[in-house]
Amino acid sequence: MTFAALQPLADRAALFVALRQEALSAAADALGEHRWDADMAAGTLTFTANDDPSKQFVARAHLIATIAPGPRSLLWAWAHPNGDPQGVAAQLHAYGAEHGIAELTNSEVPFPEGAGDDDWIAQAAHTIGGVAVELTGRSPYYSAPVGNGTRAVFLLDAPLAPLTVADAVVALPRVLAGADLPDARTAVWDLARLAGWTLTWTDEAFSGASVSDTTGTATFRFDEQARISGIESTLHPQG
């Protein structure tokens, strides 16, 4: 557990986030061995192929937070010297103010007792990335090591195709194999919301959910523990 009050927000978006992070990884991996560079003045994050600097993947980057072992705290971008008080991170502050979540409205959030090693900070960055996607609708995010154990979390406006049902059906077996979904029903509902799909529950017991867009339909089945037990799909030919 990282920041306990924020984890439910990240959990809600977990399925959508996993699919979007896989798409980002695929785009970066297409460059081969590569490096990343952040230009805070330009507001960009650039992935560049090591063997051909002309091959790049450039995204608009919005700083959300930094997580630092020195002060043992998270600092939100709206209060960060390199952040924008009116930037995308301000949407998280607004949500926190509306719903009474101090961890979103306090400019600096201390680590829980006993936390703060490299693995914990890396996981905390993923939690913050998930929260940011959930509350802003933007995706994917990038967790960047910026020196001395500190990580910066950016939301990206990246040149990635919108997530379709057809794309999700292909990727979901891989994604679900490594996903931790404390509430799979909610994660599927939120996947449809964030992706802009239509969702219909199959019955009043919520034992299944069908999601659809122009590329097809996928029906998720849930077992008695509300875990995803199967996915059936009907896809439309794409011209």
Image (cartoon, rainbow, N blue to C red):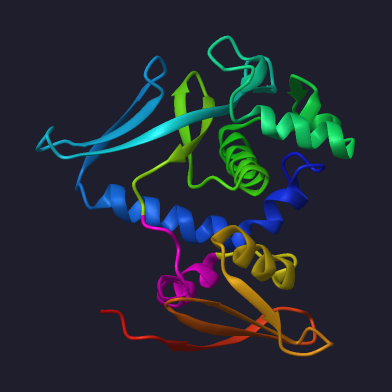
Q: Residue at x 58, y 44 (%)?
A: 126
Name above or below for residue 46 compared with residue 12.
Answer: above
Residue at the limit of the structure toward the top, as seen here: 81
Q: In this rendering, would 73 be left or right of 216?
A: right
Q: Is residue 165 magenta?
A: yes
Picture layout, residue 111 above or below residue 186: above
Q: Position of residue 194 (x, y in %)?
A: 60, 58
Foreground: 206 or 228?
A: 206
Instruction: Give the x, y percent position of residue 222.
Output: 71, 84
Quarter of the rendering occupied by the C terminus: bottom left
Residue 113 visible at all: no
Most extreme residue toward the right is: 100
Quarter occupied by residue 238: bottom left
Dominant secondary structure of the magenta stretch?
A: helix
Q: Which residues are magenta?
A: 161-178
In the image, taking residue 147 as reference, residue 224 lies left or right, namely: right
Which residue shows up at 61% across the image and 67% down it? 192
Residue 197 located within the stretch drawn in magenta: no
Q: Nearer the viewer, residue 124 or 78?
A: 78
**Image height check: is 141 above or below 91?**
below
Q: Which residue occupies 69% across, 80% down?
A: 200
Q: Quadrant of residue 112?
A: top right
Lateral position of residue 92 relative to residue 204, left or right? left
